Amino acid sequence: MALDLSMFNRFAVNFQAGDIIFCEHEPGDNFYLIQSGRVQIVKIIDDLEKIIDILQPGELFGEMAILEEAPRSASAVSLDTVKALEFNRENFEILMKGTPQIALKLLKLFTKRIYDQKRRFLILTLDDPQAKIADVFLMLSETQPVSDNSANERTFMTTVEDIAHWAGVSPSESKRILGHFAGQRRLEIFPDKIIVQNINDFARFVSSKRRSQVSE
């Protein structure tokens, strides 16, 4: 979503590749809108550092500090040279009052980011790597328009590396698991897309894994 925020250039900040923008659990009173470069979001889960997102220009991060007044739920690290707009509670209120059209677009971005973040955390709570991979396809399916609701086949314009990123596993592990699913004829792998034969099959598989975790 393109936003014309040139009037807020006085709030611009720059980070070099590898800079820690903020750390998990520390207090926060500002959030960022990326203008250029990429930012990696990292969270400690079961004493292991997991990459939960890689954000692109036009995306927000750190917004929960404004919305919930809570400590940082994850760490943010710049992957490239990053230029961003930094908003705190005071200048965010100026933005909200002075440019309501832009404020509305930002609030829509907030809503989407919160949903995406919580949905990806849900994937990472699964213990079984195969279930994590399957749940990634369920997540992608939830936001993909379907012309025929009775059809169970889904085509996802994604790659093995993308699936690994969302599932929080290594690319080699992602390739191995996807190859296993392909051998079971549950999906087909192409260079630029993956076709899941029966999305409901994955839904049942993930549901059973979640139930077994709860009962353990």
Image (spheres, grey):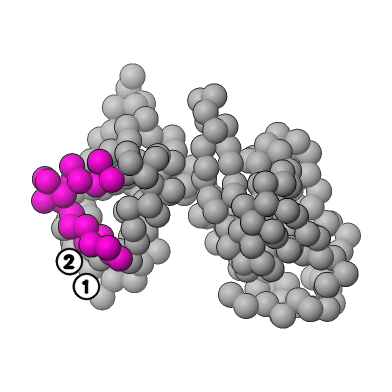
Query: Which residue occupies 81% across, 60% down?
Result: 13
The reply to whether discs 2 and 1 touch (Cβ–Cβ < 8 Å) is yes
The image shows residue 97, relative to residue 122, as above or below, that is: below
The quarter of the displayed image where residue 157 is located: bottom left
Q: Alpha carbon of mark 2 to alpha carbon of mark 1: how far?
A: 6 Å
Query: Which residue occupies 73% across, 63% down?
Result: 83
Is 27 contained in the magenta span? Answer: no
Side of 118 relative to 90 (left or right): left
The percent position of residue 172, horizontal first and vertical second, equals 33, 41
The image shows residue 7, relative to residue 118, as above or below, that is: below
Look at mark 2 in the image and give the residue it sits on: 151
Query: Which residue occupies 40% across, 54% down?
Result: 162
Badge 2 amino acid:
Ala
Label drawn at residue 148: 1
Choose between 159 and 29: the one closer to the eye: 159
Q: Residues within 10 Å of mark 2 (few under 14, many from 20)?
A: few
Q: Give the magenta-colored segment's residue range.
A: 175-195
Choose between 42 and 78: the one closer to the eye: 78
Residue 173 in view here = yes
The quarter of the displayed image where residue 15 is located: bottom right
